[in-house]
Image: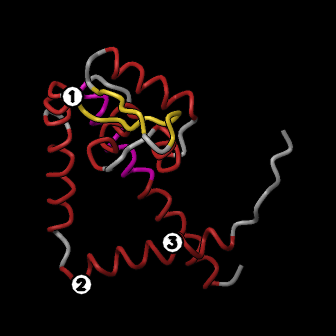
């Protein structure tokens, strides 16, 4: 193996480890507030997305439809969300936080945002821009380079 290949392999490993550690931070926080990570992730998306639907959550999270449906159903039963029919497509419903749902989200989400902002503040504006651009280019290139596999199921 060439020296440049060894360096590249080490850099890819460090990136994977870093991404895994970032996910672990979110998972640890969810555990500390006694909710599953997927539930926290879905709640966060509901607070961030306009016209949020279960389909949109699935597309953004890559979670199975059943998982998203179970969380939304639980939120509905707990009075955290209300569902409103989309006039253009009555089969779809947009998800909206109720007043108590907003209070629930406000008790959890700001801590995440504050930690994210604090972490970003440690970087210079140039470093932040380079981080975002670098991850974007990496993601796009990785997607193009990754061979597509046919689903044989």
Residue projecting furthest to the front: 87
Between circles 2 and 1, the one closer to the viewer is 1
- Which residue is rendered at x = 51% and y = 41% of the image? 89
Numbered range of the magenta stretch: 20-33
Within-10-Å neighbours for mark 3: few <14, some 14–19, many 20+: few
Provide the secondary structure element on which disc 3 rests: helix
Quarter of the figure with the N terminus: bottom right
Residue receiving disc 2? 126
**In the displayed structure image, the side of residue 141 where residue 106 appears, left or right:** left
Quick one: label 3 or label 1, which is nearer the N terminus? 3
- Which residue is rendered at x = 38% and y = 38% of the image? 94
Which mark identifies residue 11? 3
- Is the residue 78 above or below the residue 39 in the image? above
**In the displayed structure image, the side of residue 90 where residue 51 appears, left or right:** left
- Which residue is rendered at x = 33% and y = 50% of the image? 49
* Pick the front one: 26 or 48: 48
């Amino acid at each position: 193996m060439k020296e440049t290949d060894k360096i590249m392999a080490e850099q890819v490993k460090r990136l994977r480890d870093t991404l895994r550690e970032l996910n672990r931070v979110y998972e640890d926080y969810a555990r500390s507030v006694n909710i599953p990570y997927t539930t926290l992730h879905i709640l966060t998306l509901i607070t961030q997305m306009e016209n949020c639907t279960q389909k949109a959550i699935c597309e953004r999270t890559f979670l199975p439809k059943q998982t998203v449906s179970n969380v939304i159903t639980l939120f509905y039963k707990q009075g955290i969300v209300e569902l409103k029919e989309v006039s253009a497509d009555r089969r779809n419903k947009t998800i909206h936080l109720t007043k108590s749902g907003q209070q629930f989200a406000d008790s959890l989400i700001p801590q995440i945002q504050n930690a994210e902002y604090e972490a970003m503040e440690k970087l210079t504006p140039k470093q932040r821009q380079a981080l975002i651009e670098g991850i974007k280019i990496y993601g796009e290139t990785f997607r193009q380079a990754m061979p597509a596999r046919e689903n044989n199921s």
